[in-house]
Amino acid sequence: MAEEHVEFRVITPKVQQALLAQQTRLRDRARLLISCPDRPGIVAAVSQFLYQQGANIVQSDQHSTDPSSGLFFMRIEFELPNLGAHWDELTGRFAEVARTFQMTWRFNRAHVPKRMAVFVSKEEHCLLELLWQWQSGDLYADLVMVVSNHPDAGATVAPLGIPFYHIPVTPETKKDAEAKQLALLASHKVDLVVLARYMQILSGDFVRQYPNRIINIHHSFLPAFIGRNPYARAYQRGVKLIGATAHYVTEDLDEGPIIEQDVQRVDHRDEVEDLKRIGRQIERTVLVRAVKWHLEDRILTYNNRTIVFR
């Protein structure tokens, strides 16, 4: 049975209050995510199952890549009084429905916050936006640590009671540094890693430990200007739109499934520094959206693409 109460780390009373209010509101709420071959009757079968268990569906979204031969994706959010007492029975009984439709599926208790770690380098604008949204209760997560290859962000997170780990990274120490990082993530049972302008390329060994659980913000509207210094290259190209892309990290640099993107118009008057200034605002909002959707179980992936039920 899923735990009925989740202990957050020692943090400021204001943050604690916001998170506990969310936890109480979500106590009897759960989410069901499904992917399977498309065929008639899926929605009816799932809805009927939940009705028979006494659940009330509060949100339902679905998408088919091709109704005749494609894949079907579904996200249902529902409430069931005294959910914890029914959890094992609920999930066990649904397995029979899932077998009938060849589903890949999972139930998640909404009140159980995902344990999140944020990686950052020197630029803190994305980290600051994540912290602000988290403190206000708009990002429902247990923020268990901030990790950086520079010491700068330590003073930012210390007043919030968030553990900060400074792990320098050089070409010679990269392997050992990643081993320390992975050990920290494992010891804190981290569910999601957010790269908030963490200016290091993670190794394939690292990425494979967290498939579709590492979100990066790239300061470019991918697939344009992959890699480093995209604003300088965008300026040289004379672009009229700049943007940012949040995506899941894969072993292929900046080519993982895209979660969210946004753009803003620029013109010939804007220098490289102007593009960077405008881009910072886009980056912080795009990253927060992607993280929020992941925390709320709104994302399904297939074929290096995402289905995002907003």
Image (cartoon, rainbow, N blue to C red):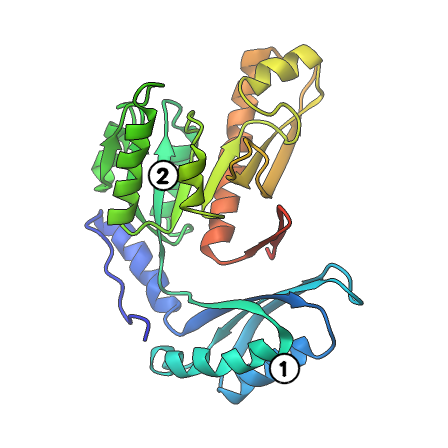
**Quadrant of residue 267 in the image?**
top right
Along the viewing direction, whichever of 226 and 293 lies nearer the viewer: 226
Foreground mark, 1 or 2, reads 1
Residue at the limit of the structure toward the right, as seen here: 68
Q: Which residue is mark 2?
A: 118
In the displayed structure image, the side of residue 43 where residue 137 appears, left or right: left
Relative to 129, residue 96 above or below: below
Secondary structure beneath dot 2 equals strand
Q: Report the Cα–Cα distance between label 1 and label 2.
A: 39 Å
**Residue 305 placement (x, y as % from top left):** 63, 47
On the image, the x and y values in percent for residue 114 come to 37, 55
Q: Indicate the secondary structure of the residue bearing disc 1.
A: helix
Tell me the tag on residue 45: 1
Taking the image as drawn, is residue 235 in sight? yes
Q: Judge by depth and name the residue closer to the eye, 256 or 262.
A: 256
Q: Give the class, few, some or many, for how many residues have Cα within 10 Å of label 1's Cα (few <14, many ≥20).
A: some
Rendering coords of residue 198 (x, y %): 41, 29
Is the residue 49 above or below the residue 249 in the image?
below
Establish if 213 lies above or below 38.
Answer: above
Q: Is residue 269 visible?
A: no
Which tag, 1 or 2, sits closer to the chain's start?
Answer: 1
Type of residue at label 2?
Val
Q: Residue at x 63, y 75 (%)?
A: 101
Please state, as top left, top right, bottom left or bottom right, where the C terminus lies in the image.
bottom right
Q: Nearer the viewer, residue 306 or 287?
A: 306
| Image quarter of residue 169 | top left
